[in-house]
Image (cartoon, helix red, strand yellow):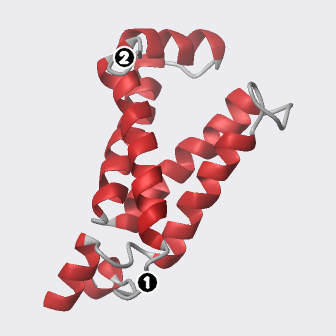
Amino acid sequence: MLKMIFKTNPDFWAALPLRISLGFVFIGHGSQKLFGWFGGKGIDSAAVFFSEKLGLTPGIFWAVLAGSGEFFGGLLVLLGFLTRFGALNIAVVMIVAILKVHWGAFFLPAGIEFALALLCSAAALIITGGGKFSVDSLLLKKL
């Protein structure tokens, strides 16, 4: 069972730039929502946005869920630890973002293009795993 969780190709380099970019983007986005870092407004503001703008109530529940999925998913992806689980968190958040926030236009600033690119990057990591220089790869060798 553990081998299935950590399974990845330890010689696969392509996952590394995906993990680094996706990890940093989502650690940043999640920390904006959860902690108000990097110019974010914090959890209370995010909760109001989720409830009043998106109709997702209770807003605090959805804000914590989205912020945690982004922050911890990004951290897992960056480290390459439980990469598929972290990428799945990111993918779910991006599906909700596409459907609830960005739907109706393709190009930025309001469109789905960026969220779709992030979703596809997360999907690639769900398929491949962490690859080279991942904690998953190290753990797989020990198992």
Residue at point 41%, 68% (across, down): 16
Res. 143 in view? no
Q: Is residue 83 left or right of residue 101?
A: left
Q: How many marks?
A: 2
Q: Nearer the viewer, residue 50 or 120?
A: 120
Where's the N terminus, which quadrant? Answer: bottom left
Above or below, 125 against 107 in this view is below
Residue at the spot of label 1: 12
Element on which disc 1 rests: loop
Q: Amino acid at mark 1?
A: Phe
The quarter of the picture where residue 13 lies is bottom left
Above or below, 106 against 14 in this view is above
The quarter of the picture where residue 85 lies is bottom left
Residue at point 60%, 9% (across, down): 52
Res. 8 in view? yes
The spot of residue 66 in percent (x, y) is 45, 34
Q: Amino acid at mark 2?
A: Ile
